[in-house]
Amino acid sequence: MLRDLSYRYKIPLAFTGVILLTAIALASTTAVRTYESARSDLFASAEGLGAVLANALADPIRKDAVWTAYLRIQGLASAEAGMSDPLAVVVADARGRVFVSSRPEQFPILARLEDVGLAAGSPRDGAAAKGGRTPAAIEDEAGDRLLMMVPIEFAGANLGRVVLIYPRSRLLPPLYEIVRGTVWTTVLVLLALVPLAWGWGGRVAAPLVHLADGMSKVAILAPEEIVLPQIRSGDEIGRLTGQFRMMLRDLREKRDVERQMVATERLAALGRLSAGVAHEINNPLGGMLTALSTWRRHGGQEALSHRTVSLLERGLQQIRETVSALLVEARLETHPLSAQDIDDVRTLVLPEVHKKHATLRWESTVTGSMALPSTQVRQVLINLLLNAIEAVEDGGAIGCDVRRHEERLHITIEDDGDPIPDEHVEHLFEPFARHHAGGSGLGLWVTYQIVQQFKGELTVDSRPGLTRFRVELPFAGGGRWA
Amino acid sequence: MTRPCGGAAQREATWALRKSRAPFERGDDMRRTACSLIAVLGLWCADSASGAGPPARAALKFGITAVILQDQGEFLAQWEAHLEERLGRDVGFVQRGSYAEISELLSKDEIDIAWVCGAPYVRHRDRWRLVAVPVFEGTPRYRSYLIVRASDTRRRSYADLRGVVFAYSDPDSNSGYLVPQYEMLKRGLRSATLFRKTFFTWAHQDTVRAVAVGLAQAGAVDGYIWETLARIEPELTHQTRVVARSDWYGFPPIVARVSLAADDLDAIRRIFVSMEDNDEGRRLLGRMNLDGFVPGEDTWYDRIQQIIRFVDGRYAQGPQL
């Protein structure tokens, strides 16, 4: 579950965890040291107390004065009457049996020390085992208590020993203090640092979160719709963001190329289809027109028939024109393109420009003749210019730029009319794709076919206030038009 | 009198300290009493040491033992004042750690009168004169109680006490040593073999305390002391249970050295016997939990004489018992 948590939370949590671990480590170290110190203090004071008691008990033990001895240890124990865990005192005789104790129920008279859990021998301190001639501090883990055994001596003879029994809880109050202090300090530090950690974690995690969000949208949204954070750092996150941005760009380009390929293939298929259909129609059409012509020369001259034949003839003629338009003929015999041909186009379209009160900016830098068929190039120019004139509002502006560059002819036609809607762009070059009143719907189709046939490029870029068609036509190298 | 403030005083001080911590009904009273005791003892010690000045007559030295509750300093001061007023001369209480010391002081004329146990009295009849005998609960007699811890519900007699640690009060005590010896011998038991260990507490209330805290599993105690403690410090006696009560014996008497002048003896006796006739006397009697004093008769202590003979005789017979 923790693995699935966002870095937005993982980072502040880790920060808090580090603070807590540090606090625990510090508190533990201090607590252990305090405990050790409190224990050695306790043992030191216990040894002094034991020595005083041992001195005071020598006489009662020698005289078997149980009650006097009891009063002496009880005086000490009663000084701690207010404590919840008072000290217990056991006095043993030289044979290791209880002589008297401050807690007779727990340590009854004559009980052997071993039997009441006060075994003299201890792995920690062998001194007590060897007759207990020196004070011995014993930490009784099992009984959870600290023992101080002090020998009772009189005139060089060992009379027994005093055992002071402290509950280990004696050492706990300073520990509680430390723990409480640490808890408070930690809480304060956390209060101060957690908001910082939260903010810092947010800053570190935000780009990651953005990136992850962006990546998860790749399959759903178009690449240009995915917004990435602006990161300029050179660290891993910055690099990752840069790579992702590049990946998005590649995706976008790939998608555009695919889209263009689809459109091109469709146009090519349409071209093949229309050429085939046109050929199939042209053959019988030619026969029909010839038959009508023959009929007119030899047939009856009555008025009704003549009108009917004329009607048929006009209809067939119109079919022939349409088919001709569809069947763009590349091998049309024509002369190489010259600057004069381009200027002629300008003369041709100027009346249309004036009709719309539009302005025509004309720039042509070509000179001499070029290895391109003049008829077809003029057809392209005229189609695109008429298209632009059609598109502009009354009094609009049209631009035409023709130049030669690196063995290619560049034609740019601009207008400031309404942009071409997105949904029309895809089918812009298809036949009969009429997007406005009037026009045959074949102008751009023909233009496209011509450009294709000469292995040129035709692109359109339409945005509010500026629609621009670009044509690039490569010169036919060493060929027919040279 | 090399150590006017001996072990007893020190012991009493410890006692007082402990008592002052114990929450009981008459706590304030007792605390005051305990504190005053230390002060009084101190003053008295100082007087004794300095020779007590040159009064018209030497002070009457009154030895007291653990036959009464000794740790009531304020009471002793009041009683002392009462005696001085009635007697017309200084009175000084003398306390020691054991009955034997007081007996010895009295026998050697170091003190004039003493409140002693019946057993020392019958042993010193030739040197001591009976002054007065207290009356407790309508009779000049008392009994010895055998007590165990209250939590010990099993033991009902001496026969049940095999292997216990037993607390006696004083080797010269009747109720705290002689009577239990007698009761055991009557049953064919001997202290030395019956008990695992014995020790003396040198005061009846300390015997009660030793049994109460479990230092000893059983003890023999003056019935009057136990009953009085039951009134003023019931939380202590509640920790003990009276297993058996002995026959009746003559109450610990107030005696005088045989050398005391007869008119002095009579004067002193009159004061004791007439205590119940005046307010202060009655108040002091109330504090002592006594009805009063009577002149008393020597024969009242014959019974103690008999058991002394019985006990001495049994032990003189040797190991066959």
Image (spheres, coloured by chain):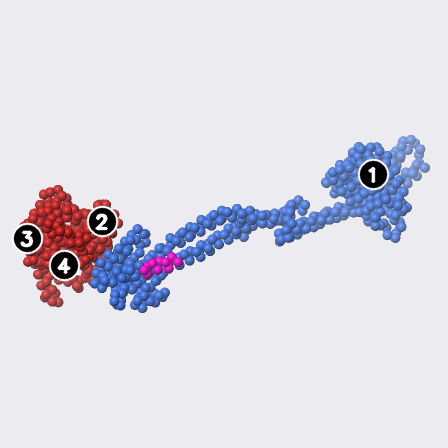
Chain colours: A blue, B red
User: Does label 4 or label 3 sit earlier along the sequence?
Assistant: 4
Label 2 residue SS: helix
Callout 4: 10 Å neighbours few (<14), some, many (20+)?
Answer: some
Amino acid at dot 4: Ala
- Residue corresponding to mark 3: B261
Instruction: Residue at 13% x, 57% y: name it.
Output: B102
**CB contact under 8 Å: marks 1 and 4:** no
A397 in relation to B313, above or below: above
Instruction: Residue at 77% x, 47% y: name it.
Output: A264
Label 3 residue SS: loop
In three-dimensional space, the C-alpha distance between marks 2 and 1, rounded to whole angstroms, equals 129 Å
- Residue corresponding to mark 1: A361
Q: Specify the segment rendered in magenta.
A: A37-48
Amino acid at dot 3: Ala
Who is closer to the viewer here, A418 or B172?
B172
Label 4 residue SS: helix
Measured from the top left, where is residue A139 in percent x and y?
Answer: 35, 61
Measured from the top left, where is residue A384 in percent x and y?
Answer: 82, 40
The circle on residue B100 is 4
| Residue A401 shown in magenta | no
